[in-house]
Structures are given as structure tokens and as C-alpha cells.
Image (cartoon, rainbow, N blue to C red):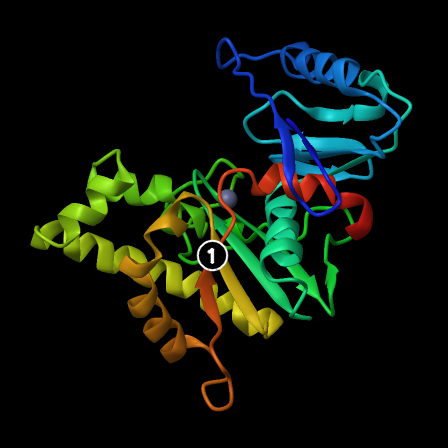
């Protein structure tokens, strides 16, 4: 949680962790209410919330790893301020689009690689959230029919092959820094990383084919290691995309780090 000013500066930050995996709705919403109570003032315009799941308006329909099923956020938060809710990848995408890239691009994709894979898609300068708020769930695009089972119910989803969790599973290593370090010293790890980058390229080429974006930004914990994978990734994507002829491949890693979600949530009012 945080307080963000009009320029995207994070003025104050607070964190809490859940006691256990079977977290209750109250375990999440009580600390948020406390934070609102402590900080509500005439200077605060609105509340923005990023959720790891699907939200339309202030209704959180579903979250994969938290107990939100059709929860009307407005009923739980003790505030009269306007509330805006969206997917957390959309929030990070907004922050990167508005603050780091200064809204320079009309068609823009932000794809985040972490535990799963999410995305925020901008079409003609507007965040595309879809009919039910579930647009941009690129992690659940199937890249291998009858492939690895996914929590979403399908098999072969992109995030089963190209998320950071997938890379850790493939290398049997738990630390990204160690994986990239060993990839330059150990031919087995290097081969696994090469396969992994190819998996990334399959999904990202699909996204570029769909949206023909001017800029594609890679976010999430993987973004820190851009110089280790971007050159190969770009070369592979260039081979795979449909428009090989006039397309200027503009791919980079995110500038904003961990707080992008909080900063972007504060700008939801402008994008939803
Ligand atoms: Zn899936």
C-alpha cells in the first residue's frame, strides 16, 4: 500500500504479510482499512487497487491465489473516496506506460514475467480491459496442446513454459541470480535457459502478431536480467513474427521496479 502524488512519486509505503496460505478476506482487507483510516485526508483524491485476478468496476470476480470470489470491494472498505480496481499487471503496465515511457506510444504491451505471466495492453493510447476486465491474460494462452496442466484448467499455457516459476522448475534452481550466473558457466543450465528464451519468444511473438504494438516492455522479476536474455529473445521473435518485413522490433525491459503496481493503481482513475 502507498500514497502516490500526481507525478507518480511514492510518498509513503506500508506492507503487510499474511499469516498463512489459507488467508481470510479480513486478513487482507483489515490492514487496508487501517491504512485508509490513518491516511484519509482532503488531499487524497481516490483509492486504486491492483488485484492478482479478474475485476470489473469494483467487483473482484476471481483471484487465483487469494480468497476473492465475487467480492464487492466497496462493501468492505470504510471510505467515501472513489475506488478503482483492476488487475495488478494492468496497474504495473499503467505505471510503466505513463511514468517511464511518458505515453509516447499508442499501441503498447507490457508483459510481466514472475510467478505467472500477465499483461497490460494499450490500444490507441487506451488500456484495453475487455468486456469483463479479463483482457490481457496472456499467461493462459496455450502454446503447447495437451502440455503441462495449469491451474486455470487448460494444458500447455504460456506461463507453464515461460514464467519465472517455469524457469526455476526447469533448472531445479530457486534463485534467478544463480540461474543466470550458472548459465554462463554450465552448459546444461545454458541449454535450459536457451529453451526457456525460445518459450518466451513463442508467446511474445503471438502477442505482437495480435496487437502489432509499437513497444513491448518486459516487466516482473525477470526484467532485472534483461542484458542476459534480450539479444537472443529479440532475434528469435524477429524470426517468428508474421510481419518480418517492415516491423521495427521495439522490445525492452521495464524501468520501474517493485513499486510499479502501487504507482499504476494510483492512476487507474485516468485509465478505466
Ligand atoms: Zn492457464
Residue 88 in the image: above or below residue 201: above
Q: Is residue 177 left or right of residue 143?
A: left
Residue drawn at point x = 36 percent, y = 39 percent: 165
| Quadrant of res 5 | top right
Observer-nearest residue: 208 or 225? 225
Residue for point 56% across, 20% down? 15
**Total numbered badges shown on the rendered structure:** 1
Image coordinates for residue 224, horizontal then vertical, percent: 37, 49
Image coordinates of residue 154 in percent, x first then y, are: 50, 44
Pick whichever, 121 or 22, lies toward us.
121
Left or right: 65, with 68 as reference point: left
Residue 219 in the image: state x and y as whole percent.
48, 51
In front: 121, or 267? Answer: 267
Who's the residue at 21% across and 36% down the image? Answer: 173
Q: Is residue 127 visible?
A: yes
Q: Secondary structure at mark 1?
A: strand
Farthest left residue?
186
Q: Quadrant location of residue 226?
A: bottom left
Q: Is residue 157 left or right of residue 119?
A: left
Residue at the image position 46 percent from the left and 42 percent from the top: 116
Neighbor class of circle 1 (other Cα within 10 Å; few <14, some 14-19, many 20+) is: many
Rendered view: 25 above or below 214: above
Residue beneath disc 1: 218
Residue 147 seen in the current view: no
Instruction: State the image coordinates of residue 113 (x, y, percent, origin top left).
Output: 44, 48
Amino acid at each position: 500500500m502507498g500514497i502516490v502524488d500526481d507525478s507518480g512519486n511514492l510518498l509513503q509505503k506500508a506492507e503487510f504479510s499474511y499469516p498463512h496460505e489459507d488467508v481470510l478476506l479480513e486478513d487482507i482487507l483489515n490492514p487496508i482499512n487501517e491504512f485508509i483510516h490513518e491516511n484519509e485526508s482532503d488531499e487524497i483524491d481516490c483509492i486504486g487497487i491492483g488485484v492478482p485476478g479478474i475485476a470489473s468496476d469494483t467487483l473482484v470476480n476471481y483471484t487465483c491465489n487469494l480468497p476473492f470470489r465475487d467480492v464487492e470491494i466497496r462493501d468492505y472498505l470504510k471510505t467515501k473516496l472513489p475506488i478503482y480496481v483492476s488487475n495488478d499487471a494492468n496497474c504495473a503496465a499503467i505505471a510503466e506506460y505513463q511514468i517511464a515511457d511518458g505515453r509516447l506510444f499508442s499501441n503498447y504491451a507490457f508483459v510481466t514475467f514472475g510467478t505467472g505471466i500477465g499483461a497490460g495492453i494499450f490500444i490507441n493510447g487506451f488500456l484495453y480491459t475487455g468486456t469483463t476486465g479479463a483482457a490481457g491474460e496472456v499467461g493462459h494462452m496455450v502454446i503447447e496442446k495437451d502440455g503441462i496442466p495449469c491451474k486455470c484448467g487448460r494444458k500447455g499455457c504460456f506461463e507453464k513454459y515461460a514464467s519465472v516459476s517455469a524457469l526455476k522448475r526447469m533448472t531445479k534452481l530457486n534463485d534467478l541470480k544463480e540461474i543466470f550466473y550458472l548459465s554462463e558457466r554450465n552448459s546444461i543450465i545454458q541449454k535450459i535457459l536457451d529453451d526457456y528464451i525460445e518459450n518466451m519468444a513463442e508467446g511474445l511473438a503471438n502477442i505482437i502478431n495480435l496487437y502489432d504494438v509499437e513497444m513491448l516492455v518486459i516487466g516482473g522479476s525477470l526484467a532485472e536480467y534483461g542484458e542476459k536474455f534480450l539479444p537472443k529473445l529479440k532475434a528469435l521473435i524477429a524470426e517468428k513474427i508474421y510481419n518480418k518485413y517492415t516491423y521495427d522490433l521495439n522490445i525492452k525491459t521495464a524501468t520501474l521496479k517493485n513499486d510499479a503496481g502501487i504507482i499504476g493503481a494510483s492512476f487507474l482513475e485516468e485509465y478505466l
